[in-house]
Image: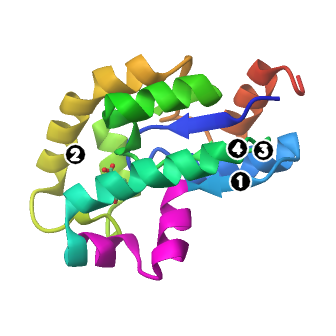
Amino acid sequence: MKPVILIGFMGAGKTTVGRELSRLLRVPLIDTDQYIEEKEGLSISELFGKYGEGWFRQRETQALVSLLEDGRDAVISCGGGLPLKEENRKLLKKAGRVVYLRIKPETVCERLRGDTSRPLLAGADAREKVSTLMKERESRYRAAADVTIDVDTLTAKETALRIAGWTGKIS
Ligand code: S3P
């Protein structure tokens, strides 16, 4: 089985769906943000604060290369900005089956109300930021994906079951 790779906007549920899916497919879950946090010993917010977004984007690509070198069967949950670079999109496409968890801006705002772990949405006007970033990103998410699932009305379990069915591992 090739790795199943989950991409999409912050709040789309990549990590939660990843957890369900890894259980269903009986393969480990790898989360790129968690991997970077563990390697660097700092949270994503701390890394953005200390080194800035440009550094983080380079670190993401390095992390992706290391994780894919491993070549293990896995579910890989990617940070929301990871598929934005063409270099990363190529790596993802080559490595596995890429699933885009598509979510509406209003659902992101509902789900992330009160969340303080996303530096890109920190401060005032979170709604505005979500809608601007989403507009910038949508076409790149679609370009990276083999399949797209609209997740607004689905639970993480329902989404994971759809993906598992699609991979042909279970139906
Ligand atoms: C980001 C998404 C975050 C994290 C960082 C930047 C983004 O991951 O990588 O805060 O640019 O969309 P999640 O999508 O898991 O929240």
Amino acid at circle 1: Leu
Callout 2: 10 Å neighbours few (<14), some, many (20+)? some
Whether pointer 3 and pointer 1 mark residues with C-beta atoms closer than 8 Å, the reply is no
Q: Which residue appears at 13% of the width and 68% of the height?
A: 123
Q: Quick check: can you spot residue 164? A: yes
Q: Cα distance, mark 4 to mark 3?
A: 9 Å
Amino acid at circle 4: Val
Q: Which residue appears at 38% of the width and 58% of the height?
A: 59
Report x, y in % for residue 79: 44, 50
Residue hosting label 2: 130
Q: Earlier in the sequence, mark 3 or mark 1?
A: 1
Where is ligand 1, by quadrant? Answer: bottom left
Residue hosting label 4: 75
Amino acid at circle 3: Arg
Amino acid at circle 2: Val
Report whether 12 appears left or right of 5. Answer: left
Residue hosting label 3: 72
Q: Count of labels shown?
A: 4
Circle nearer the viewer, 3 or 1? 3
Report whether 105 appears left or right of 151. Answer: left
Please state which of residues 102 and 71 is positioned toward the viewer in this rendering: 71
Report x, y in % for residue 46: 31, 79
